Image: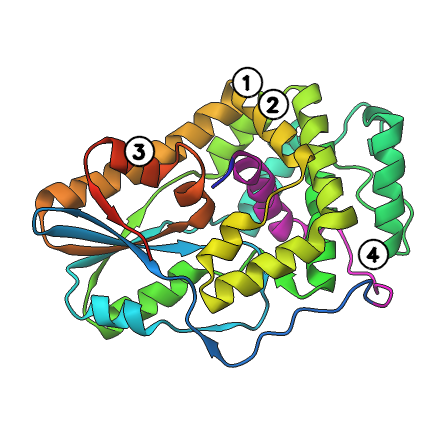
Amino acid sequence: MRAPAAIVIAASLLTACLPPIACRADQVPPPVMDELVVTGERTGPGMWRVRRGAAQVWILGSMSPLPKGITWRSKQVEQVLDVTNQVLVQKPFEIGIARILWLLITERSVLMVTGGKRLKDVLPPDLHARFATQRAKYTNDPNKWERFRPLIAAAFLQQAAFHQVGLSTRLDLGAAMRTLAKKHHARVEEIKIAGVSDVMEALKTLPPATENACVAASLVTVESDLPRLVDRAQAWASGNVERIEKLREPAEVDACRAALDAGAGAADLIARMRRTWLSAIETHLQSGGVTVAVMNIDMLLEPGGVLDQLRAKGYDVDTP
């Protein structure tokens, strides 16, 4: 997962759970762009094969956001599952209502703006003005999300924008793989990447300047980058990895990534995600047999990412 996604999407996961408590659904105005419609069954991207001797790990890249209502199927995956010993999937990021309430009580200062202030009091005026402009497109409440810290508020706004164009960050390819694994009698191993406590610790140590840089990246996504995300989702749905690699991110996203990489907490969390997946893949390559792994496609494709690290260690990597 690319650096901004590691924190911003983690914040999005928290916000996906918070609305029943903190927000009420609003009617949104007519779409500002055509909604993405994906019907029928698509193949999804091809699979990377990592080899050493007779041992093989086939890696399927997942993506977020993806079209809501997409029906995913891959004949190649099913063919590999016929000879697979096990399937590696990320352990779901789960948080119950009781835990949310506890966090809102015990970690309020991490999630909310405190001291009687609002979002407009802690965001730079130019960023808040842009936030307010975009907020007006998705809600009739001029004070919506004002009680949340900038990154959480930006995640709420981004979720609203995704919803309007038919994209979702809550589609779980891992769940589909669990079902297919059961069908093919393959053992499922869950890889724990990060939990709620890890995300909270990263948020606690996030400097305001870094948070503002990532809020700016999120705002650019809502303001002008939704067509690229729609295009990217369509490329994933049709298996066009080359197209995915050519769809470059805005400069603001690169700035967010650089700011996160320069820090401690967020950078440590992101690095731990990479190390965990790399270790899991190497373990199964050393133990032999055939394994299928499902992991974030950005974590695979990024410079210095998991695929590059596997090549550097001498493993053979076959591209889709």
Gap between marks 2 and 3 measured at Cα: 23 Å
Q: Depth-wise, is mark 4 or mark 1 nearer the camera?
A: 1
- Closest to the observer: 10 or 260? 260
**Magenta stretch in the rendered image:** 3-30
Confirm or deny contact between disc 2 and disc 1 (CB under 8 A): yes
**Number of callouts:** 4
Which disc number belongs to residue 262? 1
Name of the residue lying farthest toward the bottom: 40
SS at mark 4 in the image: helix
Gap between marks 4 and 2 measured at Cα: 29 Å
Gap between marks 3 and 1 measured at Cα: 21 Å
Which disc number belongs to residue 138? 4
SS at mark 2 in the image: helix
Instruction: Please give the residue where the numbered disc 3 appears in the rendered image.
Output: 309
Q: Residue at x 9, y 49 (%)?
A: 288
Confirm or deny contact between disc 2 and disc 3 (CB under 8 A): no
Magenta stretch secondary structure, dominant:
helix
Q: Is residue 294 left or right of residue 8?
A: left
Quarter occupied by the C terminus: bottom left
Q: Is residue 310 magenta?
A: no
Mark 3 belongs to which amino acid? Gln
Gap between marks 2 and 1 measured at Cα: 5 Å
Gap between marks 4 and 1 measured at Cα: 33 Å
